[in-house]
Amino acid sequence: MTGAPSLKKVALVGIGKIAIDQHVPALAASPVWQLEATVSRSGRVEGVAAYDDFERLLEERPDIEVVSLCLPPVPRFDYAAQALKAGRHVMLEKPPGATLSECHELEALARRQGVALYASWHSREAACVREAKRWLADKTLHRLQVTWKEDVRRWHPGQDWIWQPGGLGVFDPGINALSILTEIAPEALHLNAAHLLVPSNRQTPIAAQLQFQAASGAAVSADFDWRQEGEQIWTIAIETDAGNLTLLEGGARMVVDGAEIDTSAEAPLGDEYPRLYANMAALVSTGSIDMDLAPLRHVADAFTLGERRLVAAFDW
């Protein structure tokens, strides 16, 4: 008889809201992963070894082969580079970095080290995204409108880093929409105009309107807003030459020509984060790299092309 396969040991770095709400439950429910340690200045997970010094973790725990980084974008590069140089596989919470250049450098480092690296985009694992991609594959776009409006006070309470350079502002949720868009669009798109609304006391936008160029001439646009009260809106509405498709609730629901499509069979692992960790397990097993930076490129283009307009100050 053979014993049960050993679990993959992972260290979770940055124990904030996203780690507690998503990563920890996904790991706890996984038959593949074992959360072996955390690194944080203040956050803890009950029953898990806690470190406040990442270098000490790497030195003391050579048995932990995977590091999952849930830090804000700006400090993430240094932690990722340190982990890769130590021969650990690395999973990056979205966005994978604060700049495209540092993401390219991490990919090159991972290749030199022969370890896995994963730029995870959780919204691509929403229940209906794969089916939407299949449905659109042989269609011609006529119009595509992204509407992503939510209340920053509800989803990022007191998190001042999002308003600082590198924090992305409204593009922190908006990049989720862009990750779906770049996954399902049946043709290449590039940004050709943007308007960024920046609070007078902040460094990053609280709202943004984007326009894209499509080879087919389709009208493709996105409207991101962090000032939404009441109903939260995460919708992608698409008109094609062969019908209309709408993704609702961030890709959790899909409607085609007025009829809701059941995609439950497409999501055997349940929520987005269990599927992310299943993807990471596959990458680790082969030492592979998945560093798709298309969503981040659109954000970088928006900051380059965007016309900036100051709006009312934002305070928590």
Image (cartoon, rainbow, N blue to C red):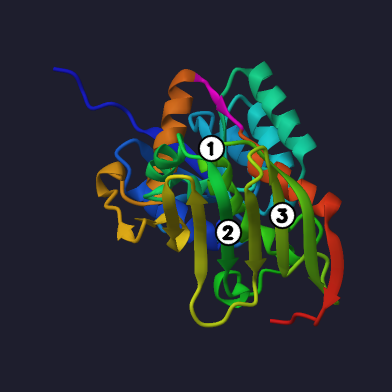
To which residue does mark 3 refer? 211
Q: Mark 2: which secondary structure? A: strand
Q: CA distance from mark 1 to mark 2?
A: 15 Å
The residue furthest front is: 241
Location of residue 256 (image quadrant): bottom left
Residue 289 appears in the rendering: yes
Query: Which amino acid type is marked by label 2?
Result: Val
Residue 44 appears in the rendering: no
Give yes or no for contact between labels 3 and 1 (Cβ–Cβ under 8 Å): no
Check the image and report above or below for 259 versus 9: below
- Along the line of sight, which residue is nearer the eye, 249 or 112? 249
Tell me the tag on residue 186: 1
Query: Which amino acid type is marked by label 3?
Result: Gln
Give yes or no for contact between labels 1 and 2 (Cβ–Cβ under 8 Å): no
Task: Identify the mark nearer the N-term, 1 or 2.
Answer: 2
Label 1, residues with CA under 10 Å away: few <14, some 14-19, many ≥20: some
Check the image and report above or below for 110 versus 292: above
Image coordinates of residue 40 in percent, x first then y, are 60, 55
